[in-house]
Image (tube, helix red, strand yellow):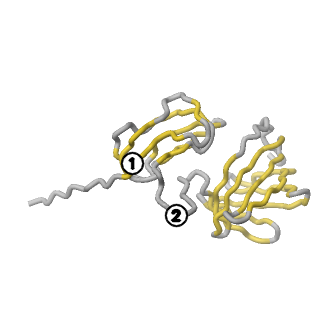
Amino acid sequence: GAGALPTVLAHHMPMLQRFALDGVAQHGALVQTAPRTFSARLGSASHLVEHALQVVLHEDTSPTAGRARVLVDGLAETVVWQRDGATLHLGLAGRAWLVLDHSREAATRADGAASDGKLRASMNGRVVAVLAAVGDVVAKGAPLVTLEAMKMEHVHAAPLAGRVAAVHVSLGEQVAAQRVVVEVVAEVVAEVVVNAP
């Protein structure tokens, strides 16, 4: 209903964010400091800004849309949103914004270099699925490990195509953010083509 937000205990752990705002890559972290209150550190590779964010009023107007009254660094703003698949359309500060969330996609290196093949945990969590074993041939983006954090499952995908060289976690294990969970070695897998007579 109007004004209702879950009153969850603030966990003070950063929620890492990666997204494109009107086509410009952004990254940062959001930390809940108290119920309805956050510290947001967002920016691009060359410019990082910290803001205090407090949600004063929140209302879902449909399952995919809503509006909120927020204080950003003490200044009141109204934000409206509409979600369309992976795209979020925002109305804020008198203009429209287009946001594409990349937070759950496999990270790419800033220098554009190829992946080192080490799949790292994106957050602290418990391993709820190990979907590959040493020796398996995997495609880039194939799901390898699933972590559970705060009752949400986060699938971790192969950073490159190749063969699984090591699996460093087991089912039920607690892992820390950035811990290497799986290693994949790049390997060209030849396709066998059979010509029918």
Q: Is residue 176 above or below residue 172?
A: below
Q: Position of residue 176 (x, y in %)?
A: 61, 36
Q: Residue at x 91, y 56 (%)?
A: 74
For label 2, the crowd category at 10 Å Cα-Cα, with few meaning under 14, some 14 to 19 and many 20 or more, is few
User: Which of these two is toward me, 8 or 72?
Assistant: 72
Amino acid type for the residue under numbered disc 2:
Gly
User: Which of these two is toward me, 180 or 173?
Assistant: 180
Q: Residue at x 78, y 37 (%)?
A: 8
Q: Quadrant of residue 9?
A: top right
Q: Quadrant of residue 71?
A: bottom right
Quarter occupied by the N terminus: top right
Amino acid type for the residue under numbered disc 1:
Val
Q: Secondary structure at mark 2?
A: loop
Q: Position of residue 30 (x, y in %)?
A: 74, 49
Relative side of 184 to 62, left or right: left
Cβ atoms under marks 2 and 1 closer than 8 Å? no
For label 1, the crowd category at 10 Å Cα-Cα, with few meaning under 14, some 14 to 19 and many 20 or more, is many
Q: Position of residue 86 (x, y in %)?
A: 59, 58
- Of the numbered discs in the image, which one, if any, rests on residue 112? 2
Sequence-wise, which precedes: disc 2 or disc 1? 2
Q: Position of residue 41 (x, y in %)?
A: 76, 55
Q: Residue furthest left?
A: 197
Which residue is tagged 1?
Answer: 185
Q: Residue furthest top?
A: 172
User: Which of these two is toward me, 2 or 137?
Assistant: 137
Could you tell me how far apart the alpha carbons at marks 2 and 1 are, in whole angstroms?
18 Å
Quarter occupied by the C terminus: bottom left
Relative side of 75 to 88, left or right: right
- Of the numbered discs in the image, which one, if any, rests on residue 162? none
